[in-house]
Image: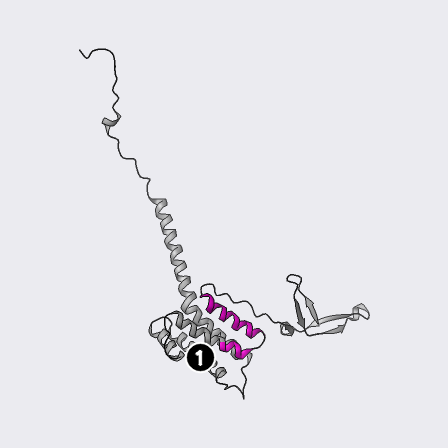
Amino acid sequence: MTFKCDGCGHLSVAAGRREPTPWQGNSTRLVLDGLSTWFPRQLGKRAYEDVPGVIASMATEAYQCLTIEANRAAVALARAVVEATAKDRGIKSGTLEKKIDKLFERHLIREYVRDAAHEVRFGGNEVAHGDLVAEPMDSVTATEILGLMDEILDEVFQSPARVQHRRAQRLERERRLKEATEPASEEPPQDPLSTEVVSVTDEPPF
């Protein structure tokens, strides 16, 4: 069955069935068995506000592939995201394995995030080298790999940005508090000679 969205006007397709409704005579009701019966499926929009645009778009596209069960494409994009992240941090030579290790050596990622990056790399290599003929990439595995991709993006881009934002807010608050507690500056005393009033008369001084 097809349905038209009242908001955007586009069509969605759902697999359902009609069941009789005994309390309404010969009428039937439409039954849909959960969200998995809809196409296209929506897994939730991922926002990568503090990630460079090109890398963020690849990560978003990976999740779009996941919504249509293009699992191998999703994992291949996740691998590309990891490599693009290393290049964005100036690590442009060597294999992806060496790039990931360089991220760790430069203290840009922690140990467990390094291991997560390697797991994304392993998954991407399986897809790229055609090692999934006997056992295709399933949605659960692809979802886990994309979750590890998110860990890397958070470690390199989003977490530092949150810290920087928090620090900027704290410093601004401290500045406002300091201005509020400082006494108003007094005007400097005036030179009495500059304010002396000299009266002028027509009478002689003697």
Depth check, front residue: 110 or 90: 90
Image spot of residue 153 (x, y percent)? 44, 70
- Look at the image and say whether residue 67 sits in the magenta stretch: yes
State the SS at label 1.
helix
Q: Main secondary structure of the magenta part?
A: helix
User: Going 50% across and 82% down the picture, which residue do you hit?
Assistant: 127
Question: Which quadrant of the structure image shows residue 102?
Answer: bottom left
Q: Which of the image's four quarters has the N terminus?
A: bottom right
Name above or below for residue 159 compared with residue 198: below
User: Going 39% across and 76% down the picture, which residue do you hit?
Assistant: 114
Question: Which quadrant of the structure image shows residue 185?
Answer: top left
Image spot of residue 99 (x, y percent)? 38, 76
From the viewer's perspective, tell me whether residue 52 is left or right of residue 136.
left
- Total numbered labels placed on residues in the image: 1
Q: Which of the image's four quarters has the C terminus?
A: top left
Where is mark 1, residue-wise? 121
Name above or below for residue 30 compared with residue 206: below
Residue type highlighted by circle 1: Arg
From the viewer's perspective, tell me whether residue 197 is left or right of residue 150.
left
- Look at the image and say whether residue 107 sits in the magenta stretch: no
Depth check, front residue: 194 or 189: 194
Name above or below for residue 129 compared with residue 58: below
User: Going 52% across and 71% down the picture, which residue do you hit?
Assistant: 61
Name above or below for residue 155 compared with residue 122: above
Q: Which residues are magenta?
A: 52-76
Question: Which quadrant of the structure image shows residue 204?
Answer: top left
